[in-house]
Amino acid sequence: MFSRRPRQGSILLVLLSMLMGCTLQAPYMRSWDLAEGINNRWTGGTFDAKKLSADEAAVYNELGTPETVRYFRTVETRQPVYAWIYLKREQHVWFVEGKRVDYVAVDTDTSGYTKEYRETLEDKATTGGIVAGAVGGLAAGFIFLGNKIGLRD
């Protein structure tokens, strides 16, 4: 009578969207809450020290758990960047793929695609939308006006 497939598909879609929301957190982060109003910023969690890189472990042992962790990507290579923010000390510690760095140019857009690639995708999507609209308009015109212009004889 009723198909179970749509319900299973909906459940799968909900689970995937929930998982995608957690993917930007580093694997060592536990029980962090997203900060309101600031993208990709987490507060109030703990670290699983066993999953830290050597550089991260050294900072963790020296300074402890930061009050805030922020996620970025490098501008050129799109590598993941985590900023550990110690609010009381007014100190930021930057990590690019687990290695501590003193300076890194970051982008708040967390997409793995470069700016040029994103612009190309946007251009292609725009062009595709225009072409699809034109083809759809022609098809609708032929369907509705087919008898009047002699297509259905």
Image (cartoon, rainbow, N blue to C red):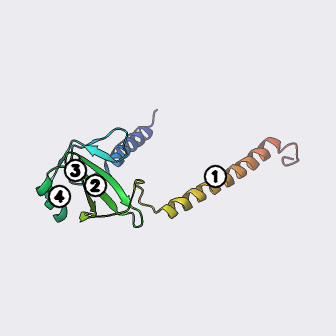
The CA span between labels 1 and 2 is 39 Å
Q: Residues within 10 Å of mark 1 (few under 14, many from 20)?
A: few
Q: Which residue is tagged 3?
A: 29
Q: Nearer the viewer, mark 3 or mark 1?
A: 3
The CA span between labels 4 and 1 is 45 Å
Task: Measuring from the top left, give residue 51's x and y in whole percent.
Answer: 17, 58
Q: Which residue is tagged 4?
A: 51
Q: Are marks 3 and 2 in contact (CB under 8 Å)?
A: no
Q: Which residue is tagged 1?
A: 129
Q: Residues within 10 Å of mark 2 (few under 14, many from 20)?
A: some
Q: Nearer the viewer, mark 1 or mark 2?
A: 2
In this rendering, position of residue 7 left or right of residue 47? right
Task: Measuring from the top left, give residue 2's x and y in whole percent.
Answer: 45, 33
Query: In terms of sequence position, does the residue under pointer 4 or pointer 1 come before the other?
Result: 4
Query: In terms of sequence position, does the residue under pointer 3 or pointer 1 come before the other?
Result: 3
Q: Residue at x 34, y 48 (%)?
A: 40
Query: What residue type is disc 1 on?
Result: Gly
In this rendering, position of residue 64 left or right of residue 105? left
Task: Measuring from the top left, give residue 84's x and y in whole percent.
Answer: 24, 53
